[in-house]
Image (spheres, coloured by chain):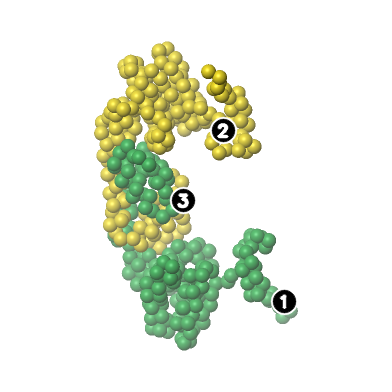
Chain colours: A yellow, B green
Amino acid sequence: MNFPSKLLEDAVLEVAKLPGIGKKTALRLVLHLLKKESKDSESLAHALLNAREHILYCKKCHTISDHEICDICTNNRRDQRVVCVVEDIRDVLAIENTNQYFGVYHVLGGVISPMERIGPDQLNINSLIERVLTDTEIKEVILGLSPTMEGDTTAFFITKKLKSYPIKISTIARGIPFGGELEYMDEVTLGRSIATRTLFESKED
Amino acid sequence: MNFPSKLLEDAVLEVAKLPGIGKKTALRLVLHLLKKESKDSESLAHALLNAREHILYCKKCHTISDHEICDICTNNRRDQRVVCVVEDIRDVLAIENTNQYFGVYHVLGGVISPMERIGPDQLNINSLIERVLTDTEIKEVILGLSPTMEGDTTAFFITKKLKSYPIKISTIARGIPFGGELEYMDEVTLGRSIATRTLFESKED
């Protein structure tokens, strides 16, 4: 693409560096900003720089926070005995949105992926072990990782590391998603969902 | 969505103001920037602000430019007798990419749209009339507008305004796009493409 202006080109190429945004979309976004008042571009740029510079990560669970320890970790009404291990902060937000989980989190910052050269040392796994070791209040670790090759590898690695501690280790349920149709489900999911079926509770008692 | 950090929330909401970007995508983009070095966020913010502040619009054809008159308008090798009228600068880039047009442009900055309260006065239509009136070199105006209700209205309006001047007015061809399959084409396009069929040039002479 030949740009009629170097300034435009610079802006488009910078925006196109963002994941999932190609040059055409970047051009559309930049032209949108050019049409708007300059204070709109300023507040966008300011918010991005401000976030990049001042955002902290909770020292306990590594989620994004404005404080040293995040609001979830300091919340007395959360069950500090249950720790849900997730890949990144988007998973924390997704689980929080369900309003069904009242424990705390531990954000790994990724999953083990030899293809992308991410090993256990690049992730917050050691701090999880440390946390389980020092915080005797913790009774259960839930592995809330995606059911992918990398997620499973990471779950396996953490399970092995935590095996010797007197805590429960569980993983979030896998099966047919709500609203999913059996006939369109892949074989692995469907096969597993039969193998790991749950019994209806007895209604006799 | 409940954000664990005000700074994160601000950044996500600002990014989500961009067209076609929802909150989830915005969150993904912001988290990407947070993972990267801070100089990446800085160069993005800088490029956006710089573009917004310093980009000029060509005084002749209203396309984006780094100079008062753009490179196309000052280029002696372009045919200054033919002016292609387009909706916005993306259309200029698209036509330039074809390498098949050697005239100059006139960017309207939009199309007439009563729904969005855009009338002829908000567009660069008067400056087009002015340009045709003063620049006697101009021999043809090509209307390169999208075949939509708004594009057709705008084309009709401009045609009426230019009718009394001694110039040719043409519009880009409409028909079945290259690679398009007849059976999937809508009735209007297919119907028009038969009505406005082009004769093969005679091979006799």
Q: What is the CA distance from the residue labelled 2 to the residue labelled 3? A: 34 Å
Label of residue A22 in the image:
3
Label 3 SS: loop
Percent from the top left, x then y, of residue A89?
38, 35
Label of residue B203 in the image:
1
Q: What is the CA distance from the residue labelled 1 to the residue labelled 2? A: 66 Å
Label 1 SS: loop
Q: Are marks 3 and 1 in contact (CB under 8 Å)?
A: no
- Residue B28 shows up from this direction: yes
The residue at which mark 2 appears reads as A176
Percent from the top left, x then y, of residue A56?
28, 35
For the residues beneath circles 1 and 2, the answer to whether they share a chain is no
Disc number lying in front (1 or 2): 2
Amino acid marked by disc 3: Gly
Q: What is the CA distance from the residue labelled 3 to the residue labelled 1? A: 46 Å
Amino acid marked by disc 1: Lys
